[in-house]
Each structure stands twice: as C-alpha cells, then as structure tokens.
Image (spheres, helix red, strand yellow):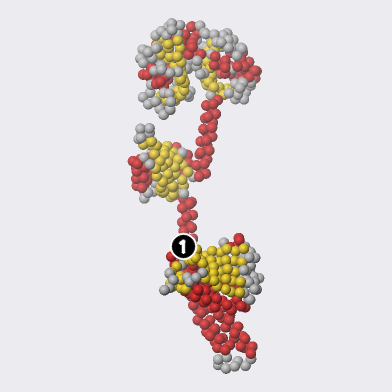
C-alpha cells in the first residue's frame, strides 16, 4: 500500500524527537543535516558537525567485524546496512545498526541519508547538546531540500515507522510498517485512531503481547501509549517477533519503530543454548576455559574455571597476579615460564600443574594453551583450557602402589616356591634312592613279591614328583630373573634323539607312534638342558592328549622367520577359544576334579618362558578332533653353519 507523506509541520517534530538518528551527506560527503538522536549516538554537538566530512564520525578502531565498515557509509561511497562498533561505550552499547541510502532530490543532486539506532535500549533519550530550543525543533538543517531526502530515508528504513498525533491518530506510516502487519494494511491511513488499529490487529491477526488477547490486550496496548517512552516485544499474525520502541513527541504524540528481531532472537536463543550446553559439558568434564588479553593483560574465565579453583566470581579479583597466586608455589615459576615461551614462539603448550584452593585443598590440573595471532602477526592473547585430573592422578598412584605390591607378592611367592622345592628335593632324593634299592633287592630279598611292586611304585611316584618339583623350581628361577642360559652349539638331530629316548616309554605305554624328522643337518645355538626340557614337555603333552594308535611327530624346518621345531600330534585338539589361555601358569585344557589327563599346567608356561629367553616365540595351531601343532620358533641369528 503506498504511503502518504506527512505535512512538514508533522514531519519536522517527528524527526527531531524520534529515536532513530538521521544524518544527510551532500555529494562531497559533507554533513548537511543531523537530528538530536544522531548526536546522542555519537556524543557530538550538531554545530560542530555541519559542513564537516562524514568520516569525522568514523571510529579510530573499526572493530573486528569483517566486510563493510562504518567509515564506508560515512564517506558516501556505498549503500549498505549492518551492525557496526563505535569503539566506546555509548548509551549503554558499543554497537549500532546503521543503513546508508543514495537519494536524488528534485534538483537532481545526490544525497546520502544515514539512519542509525542503538542495538540495545538507550539509557538516556535526551540530547546532550542542551534543550531542543538550542538547535530548533527539527534539528539543524543547512538545506531546505533535505525534507524530501528525509522522507525517502524513512521509506527506506529497515524498521517499521509510524507517527501519531496528540489524539492518538495516525499521521504517517512507512511501507515497512505495512509489510510487518499485512492483516491491518487496509486500515493504516492518516487520521485513523490507533485504538482501531490495535483492536483490528487483535481480532484479525491474533497479535499478542506474549499471551494476552482480546479487550485486555487492547487496554494494555493503549495504556502503554500513556507511559512513554517504552520498549516491548509483540508477535504479529505470521508469528514473527517484533520489537517495538515508542518515544513521545514534543506535541504529545508518539513516534514508534517496529523492528523484526525474529532471526536475531532465534540466533541469540541458539547461542544461549550452545553456551548452556558448553557450560554443562565443561562442568561434566571438569574442564574450564580462559583467555588472557595481552593488550591490557586482562583475564576472562568460564564458570567452570571458578569451580576448578574453588573461588566465587563475585569475590575473586580476576587478574593475572590472582591467578598465579592460586598456583602451588613449586609450580608457579614453571607456569610463568611456559606462558612466556608460548608468547615468544607464537606456539602452544601442554602441561600439568597444581593449585591450592582457598580451603587449603591441593588439586592437580592439566592445561593446554595456544596463542591468538592478529592479522599483522602479533600475539594479542592466550587461550587455554584447564581440566581437573586429581582423581586420575590418585588412581594412577594407587595402581602403581598395587603393581609394586603385586610384584613384591610375586617375588615372595617365587622365593617361597624355591625354598620349598629345595627342602622337598633332599628327602625326595632319599626316597627315590632307597625305593630303587628295595625294588632291585640289592641288599637281599624282601620276602614277599608284592613288596617289590610297592617299591617300584614308590620309585615311579617319587620320580614324577621330582619332575614336578624341578618344574616349580625352574618357574621360580625364571620369575625371579635368575635363570641363566648356558648356550652351546646343538645338533638338532641329536637333540631329537635324546627327546625320543626319554619319552619313548610313555608313548609305548599309550600305544602312540613317536617319530622324528629333521630337514638335513641343522645346528642351533641354545641352552641344551632348556631345549631338551621344552621338547620333552611338548612331546609329553602330545602323547598325553593323543588317543591309542595316534602319532606324535618331532619336525624341524627352516622358514623365513627362523628355525621351526614343531611337535605335531593327532590328538583331541584344542577349542579355538581356549588357545589364547594356554601358556599361562596352572592353566589346563580340561580343568576340574574329573579331568581325564594328569598335569599341573605349568609345563607349557615353562616352555613359553624358556623360548622367550632365547628371543624366540611359541605358536599353537589346533583343530578339535584333528590334532595340534606346537612350534618353537628360534630367530635366524641363532642358526649356526654346519660343522666341518
């Protein structure tokens, strides 16, 4: 709907008393008009501005916003709109929203009209230049032709603009106001009572002030007009959030601005939600963030930083000296040195330090910091995070203590086993020796043939028990790190012959075929006793778990990773899930009191320990019901050339 320009006697006070700052530049970008609101925003006297270049109002520091600057608008070169930093605290905010438009007047002269308003409500709507009479009701104007420019500027404003007289009748509304409230577009015209617009808005568009509708809304809305100035939000028929700012005019009327802040509000809501989530995440992780601005050496902390240090924000003097004063005296110099080094190298750092809370409690913190670099390459700040790792350090300390205690207990156990083994072997040797004499009737007949069998049983059991004791003793020596290898050159075929001779009687007793295969003459540098013990253990296990008429094979072969000595059986095999458990002390395939095979479960563990002393490894491959292959793999450097 086209708007109707107000008469000059209405426009002049509206412009003079309105909250929107207006400035007009001529073709040379010199100031030819300013109103009081514009002077308030920039804290300048209008008499000192007229005729001056617009750039006189540009801030020395344009702020950190990218793109178009406020100076670009003030030099009259471009048309643009956006938020700009003034670089100082003005009417409660350092940021304004400004827009520049190019307009050609009736004489063909180009003008630049700049409108500006604070991003936050103004604290003081009075003009600092003194009473309005000092510079006229309509501001100061160097050219009467600017009236047309100002009307066009109002039409091009980003906000809805409406003026009413002392009897609350509409005098003028710009196009933006019509677009914000299409449901009452047909009613907005000069002379229409504002109460009629409010009632129509409530009935047609369900416009509300945050919940109230109907006559109560109308009464509340009209009551607001009697208490100017004011600011509030309402929602139009499309659900958009509209910020309303109303100011009284000198004649008793009202000038109002309607700004669609929906997108800004949603962004702020999302930002607040993200800040809330960040604060919650920091609280859960016991992780706080901080920043040190090197330009003024100021500090800023997140909420979690205060909790980490055990101080209240309202009672803590947030300065670098206060921060350093919380650090443990022994760590303070280190932290200062790390910060100085990070600044000088433009880098980052990770470190740990201790703090002392006001309660006297000591806490351990982990920190990471990095530099903030300006476009010119200078370091302008430090940004860092701190995390409370006190609980982790306590757990680590307890784990170390538990590990030391376990190692000491294991050493005690090994010493006990070694001592017991020694004590047992002495009487056991006597038992074996005497039983052997008795079984052979060396000193004469025993009288009853059963005594000979009993003596043989005693000798057999004693020998078996001695083997177990020797294994336990070897286990204790290995765990104590006292098993010394006596290395020599060993012919593999000879070693296989010794092993088959030792285990042949066991194989014959179970009707298991035992054979040895060596791929040519091979020589190995190893401990002869340890090699024999490893092979005997593996062959004995193979015979033990191989059924009658099965086969156990000793096999030697060269491979890329060294010499493989394999013991292959056709026994019961091992379930795949149990293979990883074998080689641990006292672990057996069929545990329990009803198991079918004898053994203590330390033979394979000893074998694995002995091959590792030779820098080799033990591998097991098996399939249930198809047999098992256990390989002793010696590194290639232990192979020796053939004997001459």
Residue 543 location in percent, x, y? 60, 72
Q: Is residue 601 visible?
A: no
User: Residue sitting at 57 percent across and 83 percent down?
Assistant: 459
User: Residue sitting at 57 percent across and 17 percent down?
Assistant: 179
User: Residue sitting at 34 percent across and 43 percent down?
Assistant: 341
Q: Nearer the viewer, residue 419 or 298?
A: 419
Task: Give left or right: position of 246 versus 36.
Answer: right
Residue 337 location in percent, x, y? 34, 45
Q: How many marks can you see?
A: 1
Dot 1: few (<14), some (14–19), or many (≥20) neighbours within 10 Å?
Answer: few
Residue 146 location in percent, x, y? 44, 9
Q: Nearer the viewer, residue 113 or 486?
A: 486
Residue at the disc numbered 1: 404
Q: Is residue 128 above or below residue 390?
A: above
Residue 87 location in percent, x, y? 39, 26
Q: Is residue 356 above or below residue 592?
A: above
Q: Is residue 40 above or below residue 406?
A: above
> Element at badge 1?
helix
User: Residue sitting at 63 percent across and 72 percent down?
Assistant: 550
Q: Nearer the viewer, residue 568 or 222?
A: 568
Quadrant of the rendered structure where residue 1 is? top right
Q: Is residue 434 visible?
A: yes
Q: Quadrant of the C terminus?
A: bottom left
Task: Give left or right: position of 148 versus 236.
Answer: left
């Amino acid at each position: 709907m086209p708007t109707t320009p107000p008469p000059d006697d209405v426009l002049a006070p509206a412009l003079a008393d309105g909250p929107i700052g207006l400035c007009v530049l001529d073709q040379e970008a010199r100031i030819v008009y300013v109103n009081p609101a514009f002077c308030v925003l920039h804290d300048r006297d209008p008499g000192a501005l007229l005729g001056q270049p617009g750039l006189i109002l540009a801030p020395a520091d344009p702020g950190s916003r990218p793109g178009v600057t406020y100076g670009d608008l003030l030099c009259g070169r471009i048309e643009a709109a956006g938020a700009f930093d003034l670089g100082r605290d003005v009417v409660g905010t350092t940021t304004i929203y400004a827009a520049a438009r190019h307009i050609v007047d009736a004489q063909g002269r180009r003008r630049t009209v700049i409108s500006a308003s604070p991003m936050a409500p103004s604290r003081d709507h009075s003009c600092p230049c003194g009473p309005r009479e000092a510079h006229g009701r309509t501001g100061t104007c160097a050219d009467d032709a600017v009236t047309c420019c100002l009307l066009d500027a109002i039409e091009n404003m980003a906000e809805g603009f409406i003026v009413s007289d002392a009897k609350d009748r509409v005098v003028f509304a710009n196009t933006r106001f019509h677009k914000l409230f299409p449901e009452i577009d047909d009613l907005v015209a000069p002379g229409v009572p504002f109460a009629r617009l409010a009632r129509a808005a409530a009935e047609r568009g369900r416009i509300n002030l945050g919940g109230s509708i109907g006559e109560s809304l109308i009464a509340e809305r009209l009551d607001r007009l009697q208490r100017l100035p004011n600011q509030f939000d309402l929602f139009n028929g499309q659900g958009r959030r509209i910020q309303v700012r109303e100011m009284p005019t000198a004649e008793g009327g009202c000038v109002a601005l309607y700004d669609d802040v929906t997108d800004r509000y949603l962004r702020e809501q999302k930002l607040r939600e993200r800040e809330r989530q960040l604060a919650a995440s920091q609280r859960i992780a016991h992780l706080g963030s901080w920043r040190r601005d090197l330009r003024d050496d100021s500090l800023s902390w997140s909420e979690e930083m205060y909790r980490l240090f055990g101080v209240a924000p309202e009672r803590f003097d947030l300065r670098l000296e206060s921060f350093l004063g919380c650090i443990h005296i022994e760590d303070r110099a280190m932290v200062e040195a790390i910060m100085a080094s990070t600044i000088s190298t433009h880098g980052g750092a990770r470190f740990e330090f201790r703090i002392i809370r006001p309660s006297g409690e000591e806490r351990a913190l982990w920190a990471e910091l990095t530099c903030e670099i300006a476009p010119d390459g200078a370091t302008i700040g430090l940004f860092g995070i701190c995390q409370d790792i006190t609980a982790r350090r306590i757990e680590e300390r307890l784990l170390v203590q538990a590990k030391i205690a376990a190692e000491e207990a294991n050493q005690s156990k090994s010493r006990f086993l070694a001592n017991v083994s020694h004590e047992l072997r002495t009487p056991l040797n006597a038992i074996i020796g005497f039983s052997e004499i008795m079984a052979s009737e060396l000193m004469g007949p025993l009288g009853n043939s059963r005594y000979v069998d009993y003596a043989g049983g005693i000798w057999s059991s004693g020998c078996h028990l001695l083997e177990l004791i020797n294994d336990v003793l070897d286990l204790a020596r290995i765990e104590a790190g006292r098993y010394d290898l006596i290395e020599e050159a060993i012919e593999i075929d000879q070693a296989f012959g010794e092993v088959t001779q030792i285990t042949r009687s066991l194989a014959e007793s179970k009707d298991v075929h035992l054979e040895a295969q060596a791929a040519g003459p091979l020589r190995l540098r190893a401990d002869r006793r340890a090699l024999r013990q490893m092979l005997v253990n593996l062959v004995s296990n193979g015979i033990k778990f191989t059924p009658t008429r099965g086969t156990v094979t000793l096999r030697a072969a060269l491979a890329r990773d060294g010499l493989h000595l394999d013991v292959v059986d056709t026994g019961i095999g091992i379930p795949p899930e149990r293979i990883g458990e074998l080689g641990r002390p006292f672990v057996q395939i069929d545990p329990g009191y009803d198991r079918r095979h004898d053994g203590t479960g330390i033979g394979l563990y000893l074998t694995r320990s002995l091959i590792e002393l030779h820098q080799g490894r033990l591998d097991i491959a098996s399939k249930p019901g198809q047999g098992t292959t256990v390989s002793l793999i010696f590194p290639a450097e232990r192979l020796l050339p053939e004997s001459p």
